[in-house]
């Protein structure tokens, strides 16, 4: 009985105390252990947890804040999800994903291997975040946007300045926008609806709706409505 190898076991309808142990199946959910799930994690349906994952990791003064994860979650090995997150249905992570505290994440969201989502981030429905992406606090990713591998978003114009913490401003990626691999978004830039940011671009100013930008600093070269592949 794998439950004998756990510090504590499941209780009630998905409620649980701190779990550490080996592989088990519970309510049609397959868990590949060792793993850790902290108290106040609420599962809203079936889920799979990979080896060495940590779910509901407490942060300062956040030990009792509920973490809620929707039905049909797939959390792959070495993922760490902090307390206070609200995550929708069909959530998927790659391996080694870090999701800090107090984020809101919609349905059908995928976060790729070794990507980092800092705290107080809003992620809409159907968002695809590829591997090795960095998303700092206060960013907003609207529905159906796409973030390519190794994209870096920033939120501090003057790092380590005296009032930097009070002036952090995340990027805003509007619905359906696409950010190419290796692009860098400076603090507070807004990527317009359905816009396309080319690979390696450094975005220093807002991108208009349907705009296509490339380069360092990025410049407008086209509109997505002129690209046959998007018609």
Image (spheres, helix red, strand yellow):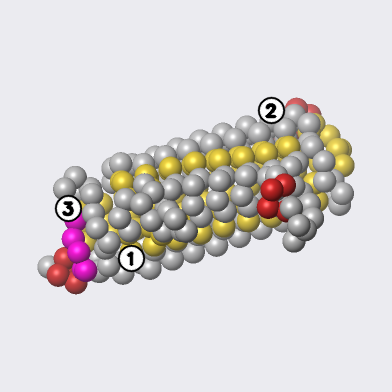
Q: Earlier in the sequence, mark 2 or mark 3?
A: 3
Q: To which residue does mark 1 refer?
A: 35
Residue 181 seen in the figure: no
Local secondary structure at mark 2:
loop
Residue 109 x/y as whole percent: 49, 43
Q: To which residue does mark 3 refer?
A: 11
Crowding at mark 3 (Cα within 10 Å: few <14, some 14-19, many 20+): few
Crowding at mark 2 (Cα within 10 Å: few <14, some 14-19, many 20+): few
Q: Residue at x 87, y 42 (%)?
A: 219
Task: Report the mark closest to the observer, 1 or 3.
Answer: 3
Task: Report the mark closest to the observer, 2 or 3.
Answer: 3
Which stretch appears magenta? Answer: 6-11
Q: Residue at x 14, y 70 (%)?
A: 4
Q: Earlier in the sequence, mark 1 or mark 3?
A: 3
User: Image height check: is 130 above or below 197?
Assistant: below
Q: CA distance from mark 2 to mark 3?
A: 52 Å
Residue 106 x/y as whole percent: 48, 38
Residue 67 x/y as whole percent: 38, 48
């Amino acid at each position: 009985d794998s439950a004998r190898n756990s510090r504590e076991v499941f209780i009630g309808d998905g409620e649980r105390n701190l779990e550490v142990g080996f592989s088990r199946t519970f309510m049609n959910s397959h868990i590949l252990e060792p793993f850790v799930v902290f108290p106040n994690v609420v599962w809203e349906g079936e889920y799979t947890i990979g080896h060495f994952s940590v779910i509901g990791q407490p942060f300062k003064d956040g030990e009792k804040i509920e973490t809620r994860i929707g039905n049909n979650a797939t959390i792959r090995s070495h993922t760490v999800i902090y307390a206070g997150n609200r995550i929708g249905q069909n959530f998927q992570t790659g391996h080694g994903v870090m999701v800090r505290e107090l984020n809101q994440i919609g349905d059908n969201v995928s976060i790729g291997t070794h990507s980092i989502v800092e705290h107080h981030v809003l992620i809409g429905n159907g968002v695809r975040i590829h591997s090795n992406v960095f998303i700092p606090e206060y960013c907003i990713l609207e529905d159906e946007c796409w973030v390519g591998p190794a994209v870096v978003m920033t939120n501090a114009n003057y790092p380590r300045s005296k009032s930097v913490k009070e002036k952090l401003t995340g990027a805003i990626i509007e619905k359906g926008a696409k950010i190419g691999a290796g692009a860098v978004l400076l603090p507070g830039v807004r990527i317009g609806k359905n816009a396309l940011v080319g690979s390696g671009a450094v975005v220093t100013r807002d991108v208009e709706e349907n705009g296509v930008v490339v380069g360092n600093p990025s410049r407008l070269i086209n509109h997505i409505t002129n690209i046959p592949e998007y018609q």
